[in-house]
Image (cartoon, grey):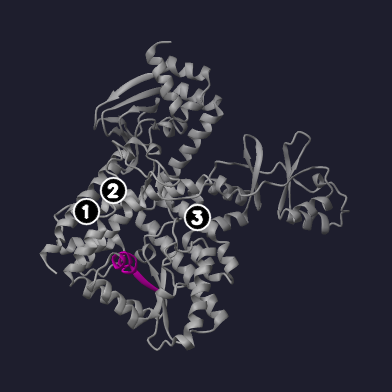
Amino acid sequence: MNAEQLEIIEFFQKHAPLNSLGEAHVQLVLANLEISYFKAGSPILSFDEPANYWFVIRSGAVEVFRRDGQLYNRLCEGGYFGEFGLLRGKKVRFPAKALEDTLCYLIPATVFGTLFEQCEAFADYVEIEDNTRLKQAVSRSHQNNVLFTANIDQLISNSPLCLSGDTPVQEAAVQMAQSNQTAVIVQDESQSLIGIVTDQDFRDRVVAKGLPYSTPIRHIMTESPGTVNHNQLVFEAMMLMLRNNTQHVPVLKNSEVVGMVSQSDLVKYQSRNSLFLVNSIFNSTSVVELAALKKDVQAAFVRMVQEDANSRMVGSAMAAIGRSFKQKLLELAVQELGSPPVPCCFLALGSMAREEQLIVTDQDNALIIDDRYDPALHGQYFERLANLVCDGLNACGYDHCTGKIMASNPQWRMPLAQWKSTFLDWINNPSPEGLLNSNVFFDLDGVWGETAFAKELNQLIRSKGSASYRFLSSMARNAILRTPPLGFFKDFVMEMDGSQTKTINMKRRGTAPLADLIRVHALSVGSHSRNSFARLADIEKSGILVKGQVANIRDSMELISMVRIRHQAISLESGGKPDNNVDPKKLSDFERKNLKDAFQILSDAQTFLKFRYQSSRGQ
């Protein structure tokens, strides 16, 4: 074996699904492999031409497009494309061109077909990826219907109940009740699927006909029921139920029953859409019921990422869900405590107020109380109200704030006049502590009660904050304390303390400093917006930044946010605990290059901020 072949094998071992091939199939690929070079900007595949090869990128970058010319995907080293056409009709469906000078390994269609038929792991990997591409290709027409975009895998939460055909119906019914199952898989001696028995079968075929409870379930089962494969679309399971007039479908993987999908599963999955989820929150009658929706919140987040929602869509939806939890918890608290003795307004702060909330978040909130508040008469009520809400949020997945910025902290539960006085002190006498508080409290939204109180505070922030150059200068200095990891691609400037070493905290080093500098500019122009992207639009209209700078900051915010969002979604999908710490080694070359540009834009924007709001220019 020559050096070039050894190098190719080493490359295969680093990249899925090629690393799943056995020695014989690796040799088959080596014997038929072709290598092609494509100059930057040159076409690689054209729509509807014969699909003759499967392409694997050895170096460079490739852009893949939909037939209408819209960008579908960007791929770099180890990425692959062309399998959609090979698996469906042998015609190219997704055109591709070289984004950079690119070297590709070309595997002939016949060899690809052999790998797909003979190598199960390879086929599963490619097929799942192919389904993902198919779902994305139709996402424009079905983007709001998760039945068209999700795999059946995502519906399976419990192992199926499998029994022998000789099991008496009474014993089967007992086991179904104990395991909370509405159907049972019937198997023969070799553990092969031979039938299915449902709750309805017990009613129609046992009780209605007066059969003895000792009757074997094989006498009442539906033989050879329709099945679906684990990586098929949820939509396909639904169509099978409609065609066969059934409510249950066994799910197979490698001919083995791994689960059962029911009509109720489809309804439940569809209900995890964020709009349905909000409805579920308000229909809940206790904190226990609300806490049980945590998994649905995570599912809604993952689904939005799978459906290519942008960061603003994700942030807005997650903030709406978070506000709904607060509002329902306040409703439950009032049911327990009675109506507030004086008017009050419960505030959302920080990312929730900016509509930039993600799945990894704690709770930042506060309470404004009417100026008629008397601590001796009303203090106990509002303390209990705040504790019920904050503890309820913690139970629902919104952790207690480590900095104690919560209404349960007496410091952040005060009358409107005191809030105004506190805000004015932060603006007129900026101190390190006051500036840190301003970063949180100056993004506020009234979510329940007398929301006019929140409007008054926002108006005060706009009028007084924009007029104090000293305050803006102090906020600007504070906004550049958290710098981007500009050594990310050279000397790997990463987190080196705590458990998350050799990673980048995408919030602390990316989205947070961006939100901080955007806030300063927004204050200076008197913006009424809270969302960072909406603030950027106001900043652009004001003309305080040079042409193109706002667009660059907007693109930087979107890219860094989406890297963070996708990282959290991947963690959830793999059963891990999501966080903000991204390992750069797990990003593609293309992502790393673009992320470097985004961090450079952040650095340049911080430099501009520093010089625009120099304290020497005025007080």
- Image coordinates of residue 531 in percent, x first then y, are 31, 63
Q: Is residue 525 visible?
A: no
Q: Earlier in the sequence, mark 2 or mark 3?
A: 3
Q: Is residue 25 left or right of residue 421?
A: right
- Image coordinates of residue 617 in percent, x first then y, are 11, 64
Residue 298 numbered mark, or none: 3
Instruction: Name the residue beneath numbered marker 1.
Output: 606
Q: With respect to residue 267, does 138 lie above or below?
A: above
477 or 520: which is nearer to us? 477
Give the extent of the magenta segment: 433-447
Distance from label 1 to label 2 (Cα)? 10 Å
**Residue at 67% across, 46% down:** 159
Amino acid on which the number 2 mark rests in the picture: Pro
Q: Is residue 13 left or right of residue 478?
A: right
Q: Main secondary structure of the magenta part?
A: helix
Q: Earlier in the sequence, mark 1 or mark 2?
A: 2
Q: Quadrant of residue 264?
A: bottom right
Residue contact at pointers 1 and 2, CB within 8 angstroms = yes
Instruction: Name the residue beneath numbered marker 2.
Output: 484
- Image coordinates of residue 227 in percent, x first then y, are 64, 42
Q: Is residue 82 left or right of residue 483?
A: right
